[in-house]
Amino acid sequence: MAGRGPQPKDPSKRARSNSDPMGMRIIHADPMAQPVLPELMPSGEPWPAQTRLWWGMWADSPLSEDFTSTDWSELLDSAVLHGAFWSGETKHAAELRLRVAKFGATPEDRARLRIQFAQADEADSKRTSTSSTSARERRGPLKAV
């Protein structure tokens, strides 16, 4: 099975702190709205219902807020594979998985891309600490039967 290996280690837990040999290049890019899915797939067939839902899901995703025209173009190519997959051509499954991984489709993909939803930070701050109570206090007294 093709893939990119294990997800990266948390930088605070690394033994070495090597700096990047090359600095990051910052460019200005204007986000673009999601284009409309063409009426028919390139094969001339109508899009499967699952692919239409999938395309709509990407429009609603917070990940797509910064997508540029090239991102949407690549995702449209992925929609063709998604449509073929849902039409029964399962040979496209691996390529589809690799393509949507680049956009952060699953939690593992987002971890690899170092993307974290803000709700996770908020949930961590709201979580109550249970370290102040022992397991016996949480369970209550044990009774022999």
Image: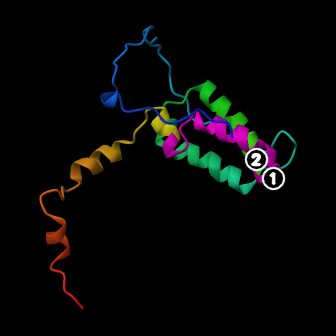
Q: Quadrant of the N terminus?
A: top right
> Are circles 2 and 1 on residues that touch, CB within 8 Å?
yes
Above or below — where is 143 with respect to 55? below
Which of 85 and 3 lies nearest the eye of the viewer? 3
Which of 75 and 8 lies nearest the eye of the viewer? 8
Whether residue 52 is visible to the viewer of this picture, yes or no, is yes
Please name the predominant secondary structure of the magenta segment in the image: helix
Q: How was the colour assigned to the protein in this rendering? A: rainbow
Q: What residue type is labelled 2?
A: Gly
Q: CA separation, marks 2 and 1?
A: 6 Å
Q: Where is residue 105 in the image (x, y as percent from the top left)?
A: 55, 42
Say what secondary structure mark 1 lies in: loop
Above or below — where is 121 with respect to 138? above
Relative side of 27 to 121, left or right: right
Residue appearing at x 56%, y 26% in the figure: 68
Residue appearing at x 18%, y 55% in the figure: 129
Q: Position of residue 112 (x, y in %)?
A: 49, 34
Say what secondary structure mark 2 lies in: helix
Q: What stretch is highlighted in magenta?
A: 86-108
Label annotation for residue 118: none
- The residue that label 1 is drawn on is 87
Q: Quadrant of the C terminus?
A: bottom left
- The residue that label 2 is drawn on is 83
Q: Position of residue 118 (x, y in %)?
A: 34, 42
Residue appearing at x 46%, y 11% in the figure: 25
Whether residue 79 is visible to the viewer of this picture, yes or no, is no
- Magenta-colored stretch includes residue 135: no
